[in-house]
Amino acid sequence: MRIVLLTGPGGDAQGWGDMKVTESIREAAESLGYPARIAYVAEEADFFRLIDRPDFDIVWSALYHITPNEKFIGRNAAGTWVADELDARRIPYIGSDSRTMKAMIDKYQTHEILAAGGVAVPAHVLVRTGDDVTPVTYPAFVKPICESRSVGISDESVVHNEEELRRRVAYIEGEFDQPALVEEFLPGDEYTALVLGNGETRECLPGLVSVEDRHYKNYRILRTDLRGVGLTRISLAGERTEEARRLTDRAAEAMGCLDNVRIDMRVDAAGRLRIIEVNGIPGLKPHKSWAPQIYTLYHASPLGEDEDYRRLIGAIVESARRRYGL
Ligand SMILES: Nc1ncnc2c1ncn2[C@@H]1O[C@H](COP(=O)(O)OP(=O)(O)OP(=O)(O)O)[C@@H](O)[C@H]1O
Ligand SMILES: [Mg+2]
């Protein structure tokens, strides 16, 4: 099974990481016996050249959509979405289908689908400048609807009245050209679960995310400046393990996730876990991203972290291979 690893300028902001990470995935796949190559698509024409005459069996994409934007994901509503184009050509790909990918990238849509499926999410509203905000209760948490890596998140994300809320919504619109998702502030601990496989064989592996208290300012939240700099720690989820497993399994089912996602949760004021988002293309930086760290917590091999990483990559690829019967 020949794999093409699709990435481009948006690979770090949207997907598993930069070119070095992509190269690590390629090496891991090759060492497992899958011929793998990297296709860097700088623009739509490159992408169409690749998929119009496929010389591979399956695509694994770091990109939701094709964009020159390196800084943040963006909505790109009218743009070219990778999974849409692959579906149109019946090309197999690793990961969730187009409908689910689009639902995951939009945190409001994710919340609506999960809430309809009876899965616990924070109280939430979508807000644009000028909208009625009387349903919002304070403190509230304001964030872009479709970003990642804590882009747009700082202590100013926590707002206590309408004036602060409107100021933050204007900031999100101006900076990221997207509406704001306003959620109930969840004051408790933060967890994230690596989700692998499908249906009966789906595995949900939760971990506690922590940062030393001295790095926080006013709130125990993962600000953008705390991300990607080696300050977050992942440990087993302790007595939250079963609750987190059940919750994330139901969330993955309700969303229709395939092969590999990472689901973030926080504890609400009443002490219950709530889903804050489902990441469709989790970070895969060897030994640094949360997904490989969690995999090692649960499945450490005597051969060490490099071997754990290979097995994680193998589990994701195998999951898709089985689905397609390749
Ligand atoms: N309702 C909330 N209450 C309190 N803190 C929150 C809330 N929502 C998000 N946060 C904080 O903001 C951070 C970023 O939020 P979220 O996980 O939704 O966005 P993200 O940037 O997409 O994350 P990722 O990098 O995991 O894709 C969270 O890790 C959490 O610390
Ligand atoms: Mg998150």
Image (spheres, helix red, strand yellow):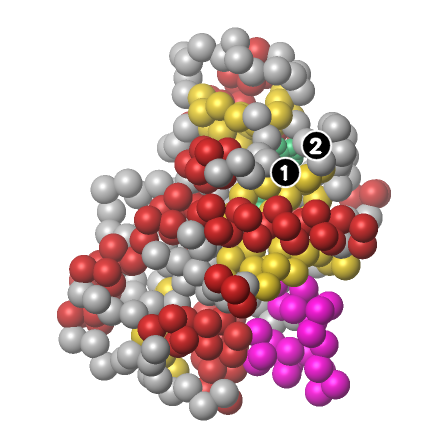
Q: Position of residue 132 (x, y in %)?
A: 45, 10
Quadrant hosting residue 64: bottom left
Residue at point 48%, 64% (across, down) = 198
Quadrant in the rendering for residue 121: top right
Residue 143 image point, x, y percent = 53, 32
Task: Verify whether residue 33 appears in magenta.
Answer: no
Quarter of the rendering occupied by the N terminus: bottom left
Part of the protein shown in magenta: 290-312
* Prevailing secondary structure class for the magenta stretch in the rendered image: helix
Q: Is residue 232 visible?
A: no
Question: Residue at image x 46%, y 34%?
Answer: 116
Is residue 74 placed above or below 15 in the rendered structure? above
The residue labelled by disc 2 is: 268
- Asked if residue 213 is positioned above or below residue 52 in the image, the reply reads above
The image quadrant that residue 39 belongs to is bottom left
How many residues crowd around disc 1 within 10 Å: few (fewer than 14), some, or many (20 or more)?
many
Residue 273 horizontal side relative to residue 110, left or right: right
- Per the image, the residue denoted by label 1 is 274
Quarter of the figure that contains the C terminus: bottom left
Residue 240 horizontal side relative to residue 172, left or right: right
What's the residue at 53%, 13% (across, down)? 135
Q: Under 8 Å from ligand 1: the CB of mark 2?
A: no
Whether 297 is among the magenta residues is yes
Label 1, ligand 1: CB separation under 8 Å: yes
Evaluate whether residue 200 shows in this view. yes
Amino acid carrying mark 1 in the image? Arg
Q: How many marks?
A: 2
